[in-house]
Amino acid sequence: MGLTKQYLRYEKDGVFNLIADPNCNVEFVTLNGQEGRYVAVGGGEDVIIWDLRLSEKTVVLTGEKKAVTRLAANPEGSQLAVGDEAGNVRIFDLSSAENICTLAGHRHAITCLSYDQNGTRLASGSKDTEVIVWDVVGERGLHRMSGHKGDITQVRFLPDHEVLVSSSKDSFIKFWDLETAHCFITLSAHKAEVWDIAVVHQGRYLISGGTEPELFVWEIKENTQQSLSEDNLCPLRCIKSGSLVRSCVGRLQALVTDKSGQVLGSFGTDRNLEIFWFYNEDEVQNRTKKRRKRELKQKKEQGEEEQTEDLEPQTNLTDAVRKLLTFKCTNKIKSCDFIMGKTGEIRCSCVLNNNKIELYSVLAKSTAEHKLLRTLEKCGHRSEVRAVCFSSDALAVATGSAESVRVWNRTSQSCLRTIATDYVTSLTFVPGDRHLLAGLKSGSILVMDIGTAEILEEISAHQGEVWSVCVMPNNRGCVSGSGDKSLKFWEFEVVTPLNEENSGSRAKVLSLLHTRSLQLEEGIVCVAISPNMRYIAASLLDSTVKIFFMDTLKFFVSLYGHKLPVLCMDISYDSTLICTGSADKNIKIWGLDFGDCHKSIFAHDGAIKSLKFVPKTHYFFSCGRDGTVKQWDADNYERIMTLDGHLGAAHCLDVSTSYVVSCGSDQVVRIYARSSEPLVLEDEREEERQKEDDEKLVTGDDSVVPGQAAHSLPSKKTVGTERAAEQLIEAIQLSETYRGDLEEWNGAKETKPVPPPLMTALQIEEPDQFILHALKSIQSSDTEEALLLLPFSCVSSLLSRIPYLLRKGRDIETVARSLLFLVKVHHEPILQTKKLLSAIKELSTLSIGSIDQERVRCSNLLIFCF
């Protein structure tokens, strides 16, 4: 049977307006060998790298559906680690903008990331109260460290020590030994949450801050004296050496240092940024000696005995640090990053709360000075976009927010015009696309000239909010609906400005002439006019939609059925259907001839905020507080597709012939374009069901071997690990079956057994090579989790074939890693199985010899390369 109806798929065409996500930090990165020019910031689910010199997007690292919460660049600045809300860490190569690997271990959002000084290990903290240390080169987890009772706020590696420091909202700071993965020091000086920590002065000092009006300074020393009664020797000692008084208001937001650890920045919940300077070792010694001389001189003047003159002077905190300066940014600071120049100049990049990035230059002199170098603000609104609309040819997009109206080029996503306004609640283009009409929260209507980016006239139209401004289909005027219960009709007219009447100028501008009004019994939320100019519909706060005749304004019919007010509606091109979207999460499709309800659809998981028909069709789009954008067919009442929407609530959308634009609380304006790819509803529903099934774990969330306790692995079970385990089990079973057939054949005259089709497709002849191929196909970060899902029968078969793989010398690292993990996990069952004891004895000698040979081979290869 042929297809009765075919649809075309809409695809993501571009995102703009968001400069920097305030919920993610900023990081200086290195591109094309240049430092201090490029910064990486969160952009919803993507990562945006800005060129601060040109104020342009240089690279966009495309992400998945989850918002980016944390960034960390390696010491060279060539790689970027990205943590998201799902608990995954993705590592990107900035030169090629490719995702190198994905590390899945946390169960909640990533809150902090930190590289070690070599860039080979990465530590991550999460809201699941756990810290994981990752091997970036091996692409696998090393340790999972549990001990905190609250969200992890920061993790830091100590230079020249195998120690990791973590802070949490449970008010504790913990020191972890990376060799044994245990905590050996816990600091409990803070009375409330510890919001951030920093390591400065080449690992000598640890700075911590919380809700207190001061920063605690801890001195880290080698632990050379240990009492004999101690069983576990602590490698370090941490002594509180003083505090740094903050001048910022509120709790500490973050502590930021440069790569050298000489510059420390702190900021709270206000606009102030404090910068402290830590002297190097030589400067500290000189300052200590000078201070000691001054003290001795004072004692001589006071006539005191000089008993400590021959002792070595002790360094104080005042000898090591000084406050450089405090300056104010233009708005509240959400994150910042430092980079030190070769001439001693400090570059400071700040992400502000109003979607802005500022770059400051600070000179570390005796009298420090700061200078604002760049401000990145033209590429986005300062607040959430509340209204959006297309021009008639869909080449331009207009957006309105609480402070301005901006006009964008749809193809390049660049801002063409910016007009300062008050809070915009509705927005539309005037026919001809040279002017804009904006309804304001104050009750005024603005007439704006796009060419000159000026407000031509501000009309005091209503006493309440202007929630809707709708252009008439005959293009001769518009209608406005307000919360003051009035519906007003306006006509377009061309007038001479008041300031030019006496100057003799003939220039005329567009204006609005009030013609008639309609007073209703409730506040108006939305207005729609039928294309045939016969009806006008107004949704009221009493959850009804009143329809009137356009010419006489007589009442025609009332549409009632929604439980909450109708927030949006639209009428089809042939004036036969009207669709209403309400705060009760339902969309109702009505006939405009008699006002009968054709269908009621539970459309979104939140209030429906906007709804628009596609021109010349009965298809319409809707968006709601659940952040999704959905396409519907008003004839058969079917949902056509769901587009990847916003990370928060979706506020408004507009539809043209081939494009859809939407805006939301994530401050991102998204454009979708209609493609030529056909879409079949049955196939689309099947794909959605398949995605839902893929997101569910068949074996549960816990990593448990039957009959044994749970293992605290530095990884997380995912759908990918279950698939990898299934493929490995299948490979082991097929290879065992094929090996049995070969042993029965044993070179007889009969025909040689045919290998399984999967082995033939992979051009593999030996059964053991097939097992090795399945092992190698597993991602390095998923290896342990996949091996943990193997039943013991498959484990026994795999252990019995590992000696053959070691003798062949194939992928010694992968085989040895799998061997050690399986023996560690299944130690007791292996000892109770007689058949495996001989294999284990053989493996004990083979594995050591094979690993030694591999180590020698790698060493010779390195010597040859260098």
Image (cartoon, rainbow, N blue to C red):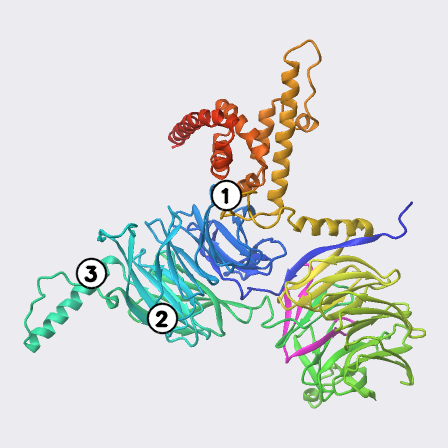
The amino acid type of the residue labelled 3 equals Gln
- Toward the viewer: 84 or 148? 148
Give how far across and how far down residue 808 sits, in percent. Answer: 50, 22
Q: Within the magenta stretch, is there residue 420?
A: yes
Over which residues does the magenta segment extend? 406-433
Q: Is residue 513 left or right of residue 267?
A: right
| Quadrant location, the C terminus | top left
The amino acid type of the residue labelled 2 equals Glu
> Which residue, given by chain and number where applicable, does mark 2 sit on?
369
Total labels: the figure holds: 3
Q: CA distance from mark 3 to mark 1?
A: 43 Å
Q: Is residue 599 visible?
A: yes
Give how far across and how far down residue 230 sits, in percent. Answer: 26, 52
Q: CA distance from mark 2 to mark 1?
A: 44 Å
Q: Within the magenta stretch, is there residue 171?
A: no
| Quadrant location, the N terminus | top right
Q: CA distance from mark 3 to mark 2?
A: 26 Å
Upstream in the sequence, badge 3 or badge 1?
1
Q: Is residue 722 left or right of residue 571?
A: left
The residue depicted at 32 percent of the width and 70 percent of the height is 244
The residue depicted at 78 percent of the width and 52 percent of the height is 685
- Few, some or many residues within 10 Å of mark 1 (<14, 14–19, 20+): some
Circle 3 or circle 1, nearest the eye = 1
